[in-house]
Image (cartoon, rainbow, N blue to C red):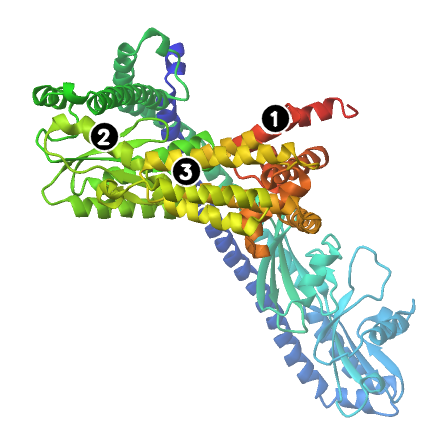
Amino acid sequence: MLISFRSRKYLQRILWSLIAFIVAILCVFASTLYWNMKSSTLRIQTEANRKVLAQVKYNVEYMDEILKNLMMSLYFDNEVIPILYSKTFSYEDIAIKLAKLDKVADSSTYLYSIILYNCYTDTYLSTNRKFQDNLHGEIERFEMQLGNKSNLQKMRLVPMKITGDSQAAIDFFSYMMYDDKANQTEQSKLILNVKPEWIFNNIKVINDLAYDKSSSVLLMDGNGSLYSNDNRLADFLPDRITSRIQESEAEFETFTYGRGDNKSIVTVMSLGKYNWKAISIQSYDYAFRELYGVRNMLIVVTALFLLMSAIIALIISTRLYRPVDTMVRQVRGALPPEAKSGLQKDEWSYLAASYASMADKADSAERHHVRNRKIIEDFHIRSILSRGSGLTEVRFRQLLEEYQLPLDAEGPFLIGICKIDQFEQSMLQASTEEQRIYRFALGNITDELLSRHGKPAWIEMGDNQFVFIVSLSRNAIEPIKAAISEMQDIIQSYYKLSTTVSLARPFESCTEIAGAYLEAQQLMQYRMLLGSSVLITADLVKTEERHEDLHQATHIEKLMTEHLRMGNSTELTKDFDSYFAYASMLTYTQFMNAVMHMTVTVTKTISEMNEHRLRPLEIDIRAFHLEVLKQETAEEIKALFQSLALQLSEQDNPAEAEKADILARTMKDMIAENSMDPDFSLHAMAQLLKMSSAYIGRQFKQSTGMTVTEYLNDFRLERALELLETKDITINEVMEQAGYRSQSYFFKLFKSKYGTSPKNYRLRKVIAPDK
């Protein structure tokens, strides 16, 4: 059971999610309830403390009122006034009045003594005989106490300590009256001394009724001194708490201080009289002892509820998990043995991975089926193109129906051939992936544009030959031509590829397919004469109007030979122009024969000239033959012959050689400055120098023995080598900083020059840096 539960990870996830949710809800609820109860308890306790301190305040105000009434009755008593302000008197005269004051003091429970001070005779009279007789210097200590009380005000209780009793914080509170007109330190005074027990015992009674023994009510005087309820100095509060209480101007405030078992609630109330403050110091644990019981009960109840919730969550999770378990069992039963391994993350991950695996296999099988179908379809389209007269309408219909070829059984049809211009140069610097994209784009764009006007079938025949057959709608020839022109523009715009298309004449019967394909191939040959990026049709070629004028060819050839032997490059260039103007009017076959004949004549003449020259012309005749055969258009072949004429002229002119050296040095500087730009080439240099690319390329090779491309690649490869040895950057960054865009082209050149890949070269340098 436990092992089964451990393997059911999604069931665990459901269960733990439910439990976590319940725990979170319970914890939030219990915490919120507890904190609300705690806040309410603190609020209730604060209100209770306010009431206790309000009672203390009332008692102090009540005492003040009693003292005020007694003071006023005594101070304005006709028998007391002479004692205070007579400049001379005898004890016999005032004995009766003093006896009356003794009775007043003895009859009052709160009076300690009454003192009369006559400033004129500097005499103290008191109901306390010890003070009166000054047996132990009580009067001097009393005066010293008065002197230490700054801004001593009348009708205010002032704490006094004149005895040596260390048990009591104060001996009595003095309540005095004097005349406002004179300096209070140099005038007669009537002083009522109040017993401190009256105030402190009152506070003690309140404290015992309101709090337990761990709590107390304190009294703070205007000087910041604290007194406890047993007339002791309360010095257990930290200085920062005492300063805070003394500096506070609030009528009432409460706060806590301390931590753990020593945490206390402090409640402060201003008494309004004498700048005194009543302070309640209450144990935090005592105040919340009932709440702690509630808290413990909440914990127990929550734990029990969690246990019950876990049981309920297990039941709910099992019910929710049941459909998932059923799906897992079904999937495991449908999978092969090697796919029935353990679950990955959970059951859903397993199901998702199983579904993805099955979907991938199904998709792979579908793609495999589509590719096989495409291969078969391409095979039969190739067969249709090459079968010739052996294809019958019956067989054509069978092929269309059996292999679902995208063509109609009835005509008219149209066949065209598309070729990428400068195919080797365009594809040489492109990676395998880029080449695949170019081929796909060419076929997909052409198919989409032609499908608007018929049903096209597209096939790549190899050797840079893309063939399409279209089942035409009626009167769709001109729209088809427009669609092909649009395709050429799109390919040129998005992929920078120039394309040439030959279009055979439309035909009605499927038996004419092979003939039309042959016609399209023959029309494509005229790309040599018509140039690149052209839509070649039979009307454009007009083969029947072309004738060969042998007399004109012989005359131009004779002049060309003479000017070649004379080294007259200007006239030789004119001869080449005339010859190609004549040759371009021929058929393709006649043109190629004329070009080959001219090539043989020129190379043969140069060979004969070298036999009789002290300084032979530096022209590679074999390489010249090969270059002629590589060209795709008549203009390219013409430019090759014209460059040959300039080369012959320069080799006969030393000043031209020096000029070539200067130009070569300039081009080297330009290569050094711009080699990091992947688009920098011979054509870019020609634009900057405002010269012909063929001319500067020929001049550079004459001076250096290398083509511009060879030198540029060598320079870039040396730069790449330096970066590999000195910079800690990736191979792609090395390639980009060296000036290459295609990784495959860069790797091919690097390995051709250095015999290894860039990565292996760097690794070899790291392992053996001195080699």
- The answer to whether 591 appears left or right of 49 in the picture is left
The residue furthest right is 136
Q: Given the image, on which type of amino acid does mark 3 rest?
A: Glu
Res. 751 mark: 1
Looking at the rendered structure, the kind of residue marked 1 is: Lys
Give the image location of residue 495, x and y in percent.
40, 43
475 displayed left or right of 702: left
Q: Of callouts 3 and 1, which one flags the residue occurring earlier in the amino acid sequence? A: 3
The vertical placement of 182 against 107, above or below, is below
Q: Which quadrant does the N terminus fall into? A: top left
Q: Which of marks 2 and 3 is nearer the N terminus?
A: 2
Q: How far apart are marks 3 and 1 (CA)?
A: 30 Å
- Tag 2 secondary structure: helix
Disc on res. 109: none
- Where residue 158 appears, x then y in whole percent? 74, 72
Do the CB atoms of the residues marked 3 and 1 lie less than 8 Å apart? no
Q: Nearer the viewer, residue 759 or 324?
A: 759
Residue 255 percent location from the top left of the image: 59, 56
582 and 650: which is toward the camera? 582
In the rendered image, the quadrant that contains the C terminus is top right
Q: Is residue 90 above or below residue 580?
A: below
Image quadrant in which you'd find residue 234: bottom right
All told, the count of numbered labels is 3
Tag 3 secondary structure: loop
State the residue lying farthest toward the top. 337
Q: Is residue 505 shown left or right of residue 563?
A: left
Q: In this view, does 336 lie above or below 306?
A: above
| Other residues around mark 2 within 10 Å, as few (<14) / some (14–19) / many (≥20) | many
Of 462 and 551, the residue lying toward us: 551
Earlier-in-chain disc, 2 versus 1: 2
State the residue position of label 2. 517
**Residue hosting label 3:** 632
